[in-house]
Amino acid sequence: MESLTLYELNHFVRQVLEVNLNESYWLRAELSEVKENRGHCYVEFVQKAERNNSIIAKARGQIWANKWAFIRPYFENTTGQRLSAGMEVLVEVEINFHEAYGYSLNIIDIDPRFTLGDMAKRRQEIIKQLQDEGVFTMNKEIELPPLLQRIAVISAATAAGYQDFSNQLQNNPHGLAFRTKLFPAVMQGAQVEQSVIQALNVIANEMEQWDAVVIIRGGGAATDLTGFDTLLLAENVAQFPLPVITGIGHEKDDTVIDLVSHTRVKTPTAAAEFIIQHQVAQLRHVEDMANSIAQFATLTLRNEQLRLSRIASRVPSLFSVRKAKEEAKLERLLMDALTAIHAQTAQQQSRLQLLDQHLHLASEKLLTALRHRIALAETHIAAANPDRVLKLGFSITRIDGKAVTSAQQVEPGSQLTTTLADGEIHSVVSGE
Amino acid sequence: MDKKLNYTQAMQRLEKIVAKIENGEMDIDSLTDNLKEAKELVNFCKEKLTKVKSEVKTILDEE
């Protein structure tokens, strides 16, 4: 039986391929792996089923150093990105088969506009999804706090970006105080998403210690920023409870997190400047208010002093007018009082005179009446004199010195003394 | 001035005093008190903005 060695078989396959597929082809595919080695670039292409993302085609490929030296700058300058896994590319390939290394695609040209279009399309999809979720503008809606002073910085630990940022803040010419702390993260390549989200989570756990988050990346050569264009990272930034300021330093296009962040600046120093200006505005505001209060106070005091001295200057003349008025009033009152007193005195005097007259008349009358009564009494007294009665023939009979006025007083044997005008008769009662 | 005031509250208070002045609601009797309070508020706010507090300094020194 005739048989072939493996080399003979593979060589046969190679010959068939070289004869039948000797042209070049434009291929659309996703890169699943990109590696550089000794100036050559080795990649892996995949095609996934739209339905379930399972791989339905796969091939190795390479760009030899002589081509790679042109393709690489061309691609990076156009897209602003490095050739990297996950990218959709449009490349011109020749089919290659090597007896020892097998099937591979030899890349001889690339159309970066395709990748750019694909990236833009993907970014649009992410943006649309963020909008549909209602989170796209969430971070922008956070109001910057009046004090933007304590800044959590997400950046590569080794990059100059963080140093530039910190120096700029600390050496601000306005004497503003800041506190910054670095939360290190990978700032390029495939690990960006996971690493930045992790840093955000650490900050979120102590968020009351921070006023804002700054995500910065030192500038320089165009590098792979596709890591910043992921839905998950964009969702994290958009929904972060503190304002996020990005200074990722992309020359051409904004990354998705630039679009969802509160404020996007170009460089780390620009981020620092933004924060400084915010604080300067606060400082100005405080100083403006202090000035207007001081101005008002000075003005008010001056006005009040003027008013006071105006009033003070008018007081003496006003007072003297008033004084004259008061004096005239007093005089009038005094006169009135005197008149009233005079009138009162006169009235009293005439009343007294009247009383005096009455008194004289009354006493005169009383004396006359008394004299009449005395005269009458004298007549009566004269009439009642016993001597006169005795001379008329009347007598007084007494027993033991007592006048007998009733027959009952007399008993037989009673001794009577009868007084007559010219003497007494003593007798004794006989019989009954 | 209330010692527990934070920056935002201090600014609000300061803005209120300025508004009172601008609306002509400030009389000479309350002027002195308001002026004194405003001075304290301004110092407090400026200090917050500029003065490197020991707390801040300590943290910076750690890094």
Image (cartoon, rainbow, N blue to C red):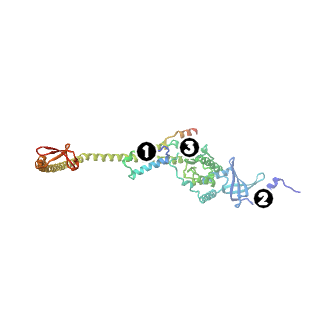
Asked whether A243 or A327 is in front, the reply is: A327
Do labels 1 and 2 touch, CB within 8 Å? no
Q: Say which amino acid is labelled 1.
A: Glu
Q: Nearer the viewer, mark 3 or mark 1?
A: 1
The mark found on residue A346 in the picture is none
The quadrant in which the N terminus of chain A is found is bottom right
Q: Nearer the viewer, residue A117 or A129?
A: A129
Q: Position of residue A234 (x, y in %)?
A: 61, 54
Label 3: state its secondary structure: strand
- Give the alpha-carbon distance from disc 1 to disc 2, as whole Å: 94 Å
Is disc 1 on the same chain as disc 3?
no
Residue A304 coordinates in the image, percent (x, y):
33, 47
Q: Give the labeled residue for mark 2.
A: A16
- Dot 1 corresponds to which residue? B37
Left or right: A405 as drawn, with respect to A277: left
Q: Is residue A296 left or right of residue A337?
A: right
Instruction: Decide: is A243 above or below A131.
Output: above
Q: Amino acid at mark 3?
A: Thr
N-terminal of the pair, mark 2 or mark 3, is 2
Label 3 sits on residue: A180
Task: Determine the chain carrying the residue at label 1.
Answer: B
